[in-house]
Each structure stands twice: as structure tokens, then as C-alpha cells.
Amino acid sequence: MKIRRTQGLRTALLSLACACAAGIGITVHAQRVPIGTNEIAFADFDVVVPGWDYGYFYSDGNIGGTQTRDRAYAEPPDNTNIVFRYTFDTTVFAGFSSWWGTGFGMPVPWGGDPAVFNSLDLADYILSFDARVEGLAADQTSANSVMEFRLGVGSTWALVKALPYNPGSNWTHYVFNFDQGSYIGADGQPNTSYTTFTNGVATGLTTVQFNQNQNAPTQFGPDADNVIYMDNIKLEVLQYAGPPPPTPPRQPVTIFDYNFDDRPLWYAWNAFPGGTGWSQNANLASYWVINNAVGAGVAGSQAYIMAMDNSLIAVTPPGLPQWAGGNTGGGGPVNYAPLSSAQMKDYQIRFDARVEGLADGQTETPATVQLYFRAPDDTLQPPDSNTEADVPLRYNIDVSGISSNWVTFVVSLKDGSVNDGSLTNFSMHLSAINLIDFQFQIQNPHNTTLWGLDADNQIIIDNFKLERLVTGTPPLNIQIIGNDAVVSWASPTTGTAKLQSASTANGTYADVTGATSPYTNAISAAPKYFRTQWIAP
């Protein structure tokens, strides 16, 4: 079995029944202190004005209102503050029950030197702007807006981040950094990710631009006096004294771990042939789950199968569904204690996967893992009439390269995107989350011949884990050999680790002079506790 990508180190915490030793790991590293920011791009509409702009509507049914834009609007009463003004008429949407929205976009002027993007840490990039709205309905105090900020290389987007905010009638200053929000794609391109961002930085970013979207803007009345104002749009990057410190090692702590053998799911959705599914078009295949499938997993173990029957779908357009697998998933036991960080970069999924049933000439397929983070009903306020569990966050993680051979995938959740709910709700209600379940979705975007038109189409999943990444050194392994306890540890991913010992679990710990792995310690009547400490290179 080959490894596609690995992050972190195995985690363990060992204690011996003979009370001779225990092992824990800690790290010590310097805090990097920023000394200021460098401005990358800026538009104040007084002196620095974008060279062009655009506006748009989008809807189910291809209907739209009218809109006007002004990049040199002088605000009354003294007309000295120049801002951007977007006015939109939504009269046509009165009584419209399906989805629609409106928005505008423009470039943000900058010097064009890609060297200013001198950090690969998304948290180092600071986006700020001022905004307010007019035309809200009488019972509304703010609008649901999304700043969709974009960095690109030519016509290809390297990073598109959706940053929700809620402007009211008064000017408000908003500040985000790029490790907030959700990754999305744009203009029909695949979703962006941290990888596409770093690739863009390496290639040389050429485009700084944004869209500001009003998705389902029902907070505004269905009339002609709806206005969004923006000013002082600025992108900066933090600067630090000296080179960045070495990155301390991180190791995973298990949130859930399903091997479908001795650690099975508690429940599965549509665990029978003929289960329902969903599609972007009218052609619905049959999708179902085969849970704990004997002999289908790694080395003949049990596995989870997401299956699809396309035998009844016509070859003629619209062809195969673009997505498959809705309403097929499951869940099981969860360790909620590590679910304590609101940052997606602190989590990863790990699983083994392979595929069967691809069309002739096809070698691999993409798929989506969707995680549901659920909380008790009415955790989200205000209360609603739905008595089922609330979903603070439904989160998509795309993977590619699932082939006929087993591959181990390790994907950071920072490369995922919000499908429903919000990261804000996830952060606010972490302690209330009491159920995590999942579904795998088969994909064949942009390729209607990816799967065979038959009944043997499957993605097989084994050893599926959700893990929290914490800062820590490699765990200790302790083995009793005769009258000795042999303590060993792996080298950390960066720097080195030294061994320390104490007579109680809480210390005080002292260095074990000259100790290298493996270290042999004679067993005595008094207990001894060991830990490793990370030393930066």
C-alpha cells in the first residue's frame, strides 16, 4: 500500500502496570513577534480607485433585477468622503421562492510585484474594509453579505476565500485574515485550497480582486432603493523580525476511528441496495451503502462501500449525475474532548480508499467527504419549528486520485469548504456538538464518461479517522526486558527530542544526561516517569 500524503506523527500515551515508567511529550519554542505590516493592495476611492467594476444577478430561472455602480460616489451631507456605491432593484423578485442573489466585483489596485506575497501562512494576510447598507426591510437591522476575495495567476484562481459579514446602516470596519472563511472555486474552476495558494505564490500571483455577494438578500425590500457602500479596501501581510522559527512537530489525537472490524459504525444510512440519492440533473442512479463489507478492506479486512448503479441511465445528455451519494453515510462512537479548536487547520481526516467500476480508459476519480457537526435542537438561535438536531456546520473535504489500488489519504480540514452552516456557528457551539456523522460522495465533474453504465461502481473506504492535531513530540514506547525498562522514541519531524524523568507524573522533570533512544533504565521499587521535550534545530 502506498502513501499519498502524510502529516503529523502517531500518537500514544503509555503507562506500565509495574509503575516503573510513563511517557508524555512536550515542546518548547519561541513565539514569533510581528513588527508591522506591508501593504499589498489598497483602494480608498478618493485617490486610489479601481480601474473597472462589474455587477450581476444570479437566480434559479435566469431572471435578474437591475443595478448601477458608482466608484466615485460623494457621500452627503458634505460630499467630501468618496466611496463605492452599488444600487440594486429587486422588484422583480417579489414573491420569488427559489434561490437568487446579487453582487459586484472589482480589482484592488496594487504594485504588481508578486514578491510582496512573502508568507505561506494564511494567517499573516490581513484584509480590511468599511461597509454599510441602505434599504433594509423595516424588521431587519443587517444584511447577510459575503466578501469573496480572490488571488490569481493570470486567469486561474489560486485562492478564493468566502468571508461572511453583516453590515448595518452605519459604517463598520471589518478585519479578516485568510485562515478564516471557506475555500471556494470561481467561474467554473475547481475549488481552491491551501495547496493552490502556495502553488500560486511559487508561480507568482498576478491578480488581486474581489466579489461582494448578497446571497438570497431577503433582508432588503423587493424595491429599487437597496444600496451597499464599501470603502478603504486593504490587503496587508504581517512582517516579522528575522527568519520564521522552526515549526514544532504535531501529532494526531483521535476524534473518531472506524476500521469496520472491531471499531465499526453504530449506524449507516441507506445500508441496502436501491437507496435514494441526489444529482444536479434529472438522471438519478441508485446509491447505497454496504457497511462492514467482509473481505473488501485493506488486507482482506472489513470495509465501508459507497456503491452506485448507473445501468438505467441513458448515454445521451445530460448523462451521468455530477454528484452521487447524498443520503448515504453513517456514524459511530466519537471522542468529543479533542474537539476544542475552532481552527480547521487543527483537524485532519485519514482513510484508505480504492475504486471499482470506472469506465474503460479511466484510472482514478475524485470524491468528497462530508462531515456533519450536529448539536441539540435550538442550539442555533432563534428557535425554529424543526425539532431535529441543529447543524452548526456541514463541511466538505475534496480528495482526488482514488484509483483501483489502495491509497492512504491524509487531508487537512483547512483545505475543505463550508457546505452549510458556518465556521462562526462551529466556533460558538463547539461545546454543544454531540454528534458527528459523515457521507462520502462520488464525483465525476466535467467528465460524464468517468463511470461505467452498470451496477458495479464502488468507492471502498477503510480505516476512516477524524483527528485533532496538537503540538507535541513523538510518544514514548516502553518495553520490559528482564529487570530493565527500555524507553524508546522516534525522531521528531523537526529538531530533536531529549529525554527527561521525574519521580511523580507532574514533575519536577530533569534531563536524563546523555540519554539516546533506546534508553535502558533498571526497574526499582520507586516509580519513575519519563517524557520527551522538543529542542528546536
Image (tube, rainbow, N blue to C red):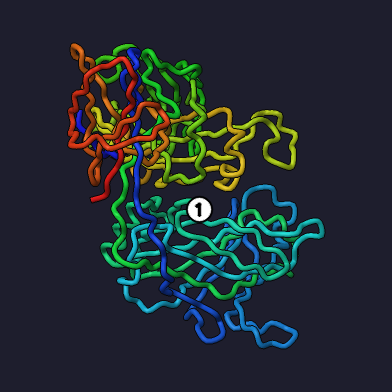
Q: Which residue lies furthest to the right in this view?
A: 138
Whole-percent x, y for residue 74 in the image: 66, 84
Question: Nearest the camera: 536 or 502?
Answer: 502
Whole-percent x, y for residue 207 in the image: 38, 69
The correct choice, above or below, for 201 with respect to 520 in the image is below
Whole-percent x, y for residue 41 in the image: 44, 74
Q: What element carries label 1?
A: loop
Q: Write the residue at 45% across / 52% down.
A: 184
Whole-percent x, y for residue 256 in the image: 44, 26
**Quadrant in the rendering for residue 157:** bottom left
Please, what is the three-letter code of the amino acid marked with disc 1?
Gly
The residue carrying pointer 1 sits among few (fewer than 14), some (14 to 19) or many (20 or more) residues within 10 Å by Cα, namely many
Q: Write the residue at 41% across / 69% down.
A: 35
Res 458 visible = no
Q: Write the residue at 57% across / 46% down.
A: 422
Res 290 visible = yes
Question: Nearest the camera: 257 or 211?
Answer: 257
Q: Which residue lies furthest to the front in this view?
A: 525
The correct choice, above or below, for 248 with respect to 229 in the image is above
Residue hosting label 1: 181
| Quadrant, the N terminus | top left
